[in-house]
Image (cartoon, helix red, strand yellow):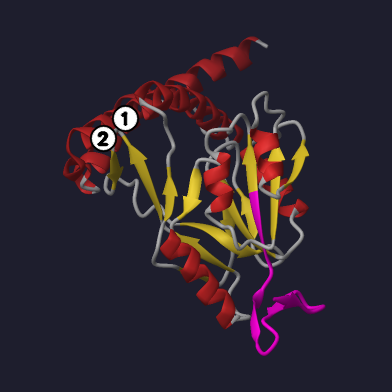
Amino acid sequence: MVFDKTGWAWDGQRLMRPRVSLAIITFNEEDQIARCIESMSWADDVVVLDSRSTDRTKEIATQLGARVFVEDFRGYRLQKERATDLAMHDWVVSLDADEALSPELSQEILNVLELGDPQIDGFELPRLSFHMGRWIRHGGWFPDAQVRLFHRRRAKWTGGHVHERVRGVHVRRLKNSIFHWGFDDLSDQIKTNNVFSSKGALDLYDRGKRFSVLKLIFKPVSKFIETYIVKLGFLDGLPGFIISVGAAYSMFLKFAKLWELEQTRKKS
């Protein structure tokens, strides 16, 4: 396969698809980075933006052909934006190191790229997460579709300290899923909830939202009802119940930390 000056791939007889970069941000991901990169073995370029890992992440990524850059962590949105800028090609697949394309999704991406629709800014990819020994399909965890395949000149990263997303005007959703291994165990999930509730509180504060006792009380309750009942978390068995309780507690922490943040800012 060869490439012409416009960035399209040819098999010698016909136009195949635009060239694509895989962009990944990492920090101490030696146990997962290989699976992530290998799931998109057909990528024309792999860029890894590392936040000064102390394990073998950079070595493994380099061995697999990635271009590795080491820079201080800026925050999730800015880091992913920077990794996108470092990519060689305009079409980008953005993955976290704990994610991988399913074989079916990999083929589906190749198929839609070969069609080459110039009106499409990007594609939403469903994400299926594995936790507590099973794939979680309810409670708001699935399909959890996000724009992860996009043309970087027509779609852009948005968001604050958390919930970074790619936004585009003309977006289609693909059928097959990204696989996601987000947590090692419940302790790891608790650590993550602690970190993200702090970032969520800061986001609220930056947007001018202020603490309310009513929200501290009722937001966690409504979150449990939403995830466990409305979004059918109970169909995931005991893990679904545990996840819903965790989501409610994370919501409680976010508003409790917002109160704490307000008290700290008043004293400074």
Residue 127: x and y in percent read: 41, 52
Q: Nearer the viewer, residue 258 or 180?
A: 180
Residue 15 visible somewhere in the drawing: yes
Earlier sequence position, callout 2 versus callout 1: 2
Q: Which mark is residue 150?
A: none
Mark 2 crowd level (few <14, some 14–19, many ≥20, 10 Å Cα): many
Q: Which mark is residue 224?
A: 2
Q: Where is 188 relative to 87, above or below? A: above
Quarter the N terminus occupies? bottom right
Q: Where is 59 relative to 263, above or below? A: below
Which residue is depicted at the point 29% across and 44% down?
Answer: 136
- Assign a secondary structure to mark 1: helix
Dot 1 amino acid type: Ala
Which residue is depicted at the point 59% across and 65% down?
Answer: 168
- Assign a secondary structure to mark 2: helix
Q: Nearer the viewer, residue 19 or 123?
A: 19
Residue 79 within the magenta-colored segment of the rendering: no
Residue range of the region highlighted in magenta in the rendering: 1-23
Q: Are marks 2 and 1 in contact (CB under 8 Å)?
A: yes
Residue 98 in the figure: left or right of residue 63? left
Residue 172 visible somewhere in the drawing: no
Mark 1 crowd level (few <14, some 14–19, many ≥20, 10 Å Cα): many
Dot 2 amino acid type: Phe
Mark 1 lies on residue = 248
